[in-house]
Amino acid sequence: MLFYSESTGGFYDSAIHGGSIPPDAIEITANEHQQLIDAQSNGKRIAADESGRPILQDPPVPALAEVKSIALAAIDTTAGAARARYITVATGQEATYLMKGQQARDYAAAGYSGPVPLMVAAEQAAAGDASPQAAADRIIAEEAAWSAKAAQIEQERRSRKIAVAAAADAEAVAAIRAAAETALQAM
């Protein structure tokens, strides 16, 4: 025989639990048990009615602050994925990009004369450029292209986060989040 206990919110089987079944447990059928478990796996909650019998309920609606927090995190994650389509996301790589860009700009500002900076020389060797100037120019061009894309991603991310913070209800938050994710995924 199967039982449901309101005090524990659990199910019990007399063949397994024997004398350990709580005193408030109410007998249920195997079919009722299966329907309750199936519905729970689809997002419903199992609770007790006024007589202690198990019933299904919709989960509580999360507070607006929680909905906003989840949306803000999702927007940041989606923006991070958008960035990762254009740059290598790995420990130390950001510093390498910054150093490479600075060395290329400094070399260009010096009229491409003097010792070739290490990052420019590494780019020249890796890409097979004919000259350090060609390598420096490509680094500078790639940095400019990335800066433009980064600004586009950041504008979308920030504007949508500001909109989420100002949203009056969960439906508005969901719409803003969906629009942000669509726009960022398209970048």
Image (cartoon, helix red, strand yellow):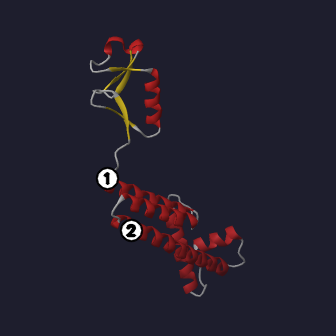
Which residue is drawn at the image coordinates 36% and 32% (left, top)? 55
Q: Nearer the viewer, residue 84 or 92?
A: 84
Which kind of residue does numbered mark 1 sit on? Answer: Ala
> Which residue is identified by label 2?
163
Q: Which of 31 and 154 lies nearest the eye of the viewer?
A: 31
Nearest the camera: 9 or 142?
9
Q: Is residue 108 left or right of residue 56?
A: right
Q: Is residue 168 left or right of residue 142?
A: left
Q: What crowding class fits label 1: few (fewer than 14 Cα within 10 Å), some (14-19), or many (20 or more)?
A: few
**Which residue lies at the image location 50% right of the left edge and 60% below the top edge?**
78
Depicted 100 relative to depicted 171: above or below:
below
Mark 2 is surrounded, within 10 Å at the Cα level, by few (under 14), some (14 to 19) or many (20 or more) other residues, namely: some
In the rendered view, would you say 140 is above or below 175? below
Q: Position of residue 143 (x, y in %)?
A: 56, 75
Q: Is residue 8 left or right of residue 183?
A: left
> Which numbered disc, 1 or 2, marks the residue that appears first in the sequence?
1
- Element class at badge 1: loop
Viewer-side residue, 19 vs 42: 42
Question: Which labelled disc corresponds to residue 106?
Answer: none
Horizontal and vertical percent position of residue 99: 52, 71
Q: Which residue is mark 1?
A: 63
Locate residue 30, reporting x and y percent.
45, 21
Question: Which percent across, then down, holds residue 65?
Answer: 31, 56
Instruction: Tell me where residue 128 sits by quadrant.
Output: bottom right
